[in-house]
Amino acid sequence: MKIRRCAVLFIEPREDLGIDWTALFSGAGALSASLRWVALAPHLDRETTIDAAQVAALGTIGQTAWIDRQDADGRLGAAMVDSLLALGLLLDDGPAENPARERDTVLRAQHWRPLSAAAHMFSRWDGMEVDKGMHFPSFEELVQAYGTPPPPAIGRGDPDQAIKLPRPASGPLDAQLLQRYTGRNYDPEAVLPLDVLARLLQRTFGAQAERMLAQEAMVFKKTSPSAGGLHPTEAYVLAQRVPGVTPGLYHYHALNHALEPLAALDPAEASELARQFVADQHWFVDAPVMVVMAARVARNFWKYRNHAKAHRALMLDAGHLSQTFYLLATEAGMPGFVTAAVNEKAIERAFGLDPLSDAVVAVCGCGVAGAGQTTLELRYEQ
Ligand SMILES: Cc1cc2nc3c(=O)[nH]c(=O)nc-3n(C[C@H](O)[C@H](O)[C@H](O)COP(=O)(O)O)c2cc1C
């Protein structure tokens, strides 16, 4: 049998802080700190504590060439090799089913940059409730805790040399740019008309034109820019209240301009999923529609393989799309929102997405504004 190390592995000397109660009661320093080695292997999707001998052993086996297990046993001892195989940090080429090896194969096939894969896989949330679990603080509380924030604008260079610019002329985009705001008080009864949803989706995520740039290399022209022109961001829709659309989960087909049904939900289920998606940010849950932006990483990484900037490009792509979405919502007379504080794992389960190949980046949504303003908004007219 042959073995090799998993494709991506980072090992962190993790410091765990705690209260040392014995020391506290004897009047000594109360803070206790302990160190352990944590293996971060994105194909496993879990952190693994290992010991120093395992760290050293992992450092002697490469991730590319398969080597004879017997050789490794001779150098490291069979028990050590067994322990690392059991953890999924070493992989064998045996005939038996091996979920860790299968996930490693998926990871290798995407061409992830190792640091990006780790950052993506280990920053995903499950069951997070920002208000309860993490408490979303007000600006007053933040100032109390952290003092005055850095100023909103700064000067650089000699101020006497600064060239005062003319006032911006009015332009047709102003109507949307100057009305756009993040809505946090949606009317829980209001629906999103189908034609409004159709325009929002098509003009944000839809193909406006097709270009065959090489044989078997088609790109779409969209209203937002995209790294390499590849447009890897897919739109997954959670519809709560759209006349003509059964509440449920859909994928938006960028070329066919169609909602592809994935699961029907009753209204209570749809609302509960919305709450989970946005990590219990209740101020977004009543939006009649949410759109999950998830990057098909292989589409971008096809060109930018193992590339230091590729993951950043995925984030930027979604940011552009969300602004386009906001402006279209504004045009329709509605506020929109975008949030990165999302439970990626709940979204992956709901839509059947594999985080190694379909990276959930953010959730946006929109809807009719409710009467009051219970949760803070920054509207222009205030
Ligand atoms: C990347 C990103 C993440 C955001 N995440 C959240 C969020 O988790 N919760 C929220 O209420 N607003 C979120 N927002 C909205 C911002 O809070 C909002 O844009 C900001 O307060 C300025 O208000 P405005 O959009 O009305 O101008 C996010 C915006 C961006 C661009």
Image: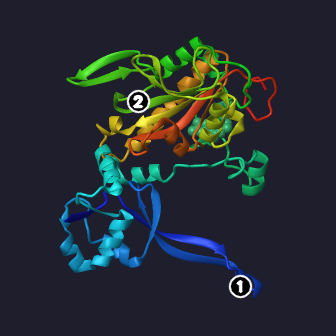
Cβ of mark 2 under 8 A from ligand 1: no
Place of residue 218 in the rendered image (x, y in percent of width and height, measured from the top left)? 29, 23
Residue at image point 38% right, 33% down: 227
Q: Which residue is mark 1?
A: 22
Badge number at residue 219: none
Q: Is residue 363 above or below residue 329?
A: below
In this view, which residue lies farthest toward the bottom? 26
Question: Going by the image, does 164 lie left or right of 25?
Answer: left
The crowding category of the residue bearing disc 1, from other C-alpha atoms within 10 Å (few below 14, some 14 to 19, many at least 20), is few
Cβ of mark 1 under 8 A from ligand 1: no
Q: Is residue 123 above or below residue 233?
A: below
The crowding category of the residue bearing disc 2, from other C-alpha atoms within 10 Å (few below 14, some 14 to 19, many at least 20), is many
Residue sitting nearer the eye, 3 or 114: 3
Place of residue 175 in the rendered image (x, y in percent of width and height, measured from the top left)? 64, 15
Residue at image point 18% right, 74% down: 71
Position of the C terminus, as image quadrant, is top right
Residue at image point 37% right, 39% down: 297
Amino acid under disc 2: Ser
Place of residue 216 in the rendered image (x, y in percent of width and height, measured from the top left)? 22, 25
SS label for mark 1: helix
In this view, which residue lies farthest toward the front? 96
Q: Which residue is mark 2?
A: 226
- Mark yes or no: residue 68 visible: yes
Residue sitting nearer the eye, 117 or 228: 117
SS label for mark 2: loop
Quadrant of the displayed image that contains ligand 1:
top right
User: How far apart are the two marked residues, 1 and 2, measured between alpha carbons?
Assistant: 57 Å
For marks 1 and 2, the one nearer the N-term is 1
- Mark yes or no: residue 172 visible: no
Specify the quadrant of the image occupied by residue 166: top right
The colour scheme is rainbow
